[in-house]
Amino acid sequence: MSEFIKYQRKQVAELRPYVKGEDTSNVSISDEDILAGSPKTGDMIARNPKNHKDQWLVAKQYFEDNFEPLHEQVAMSARAAAQARDEMAAREAEEAANRQFRR
């Protein structure tokens, strides 16, 4: 058996909540997840963005540990950018005031 190596994903994942009682015959579910009682409420169904028929179950805890909605990342980036702009504007205003004071 080969050694496991850590990889980081390059793309955005597409997931949706599992709905109790839904037909999962087209969803791959690992034996380990089945033994753990899946599919169950809180689990997510992932799909390949390039082949929507390729779907698999993501257990609730794995999902919670490893995923967050994209809009939160975008909002966080926007807040960070706004904060950086505000800090830069404050520094520029302070520098302008210091230049004015030195004259």
Image: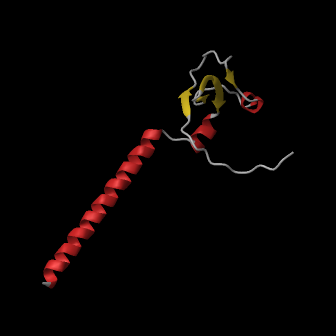
Picture mark count:
0
Query: Where does residue 32 sit, x and y in percent of width and height?
Result: 76, 33
- Farthest residue to the right: give it: 1
- Farthest residue to the front: give it: 50
Instruction: Tell me the residue at 22%/73% (across/down).
Output: 94
Instruction: Tell me the residue at 84%/47% (across/down).
Output: 2
Is residue 100 shown left or right of residue 86? left
Query: Where does residue 71 sit, x and y in percent of width and height?
Result: 42, 39
Q: Is residue 56 above or below residue 84?
A: above
Is residue 17 shown left or right of residue 96? right
Quarter of the image where the C terminus is located: bottom left
Front-most of residues 43 and 67: 67
Q: Quadrant of residue 75?
A: top left
Q: What sort of colour scheme is used for the picture?
A: secondary structure
Q: Is residue 25 above or below residue 95?
A: above
Front-most of residues 62 and 37: 62
Query: Where does residue 56 sit, x and y in percent of width and height?
Result: 66, 28
Front-most of residues 73 and 19: 73
Quarter of the image where the N terminus is located: top right
Instruction: Tell me the residue at 54%/28% (across/down).
Output: 16
Q: Quadrant of residue 44?
A: top right
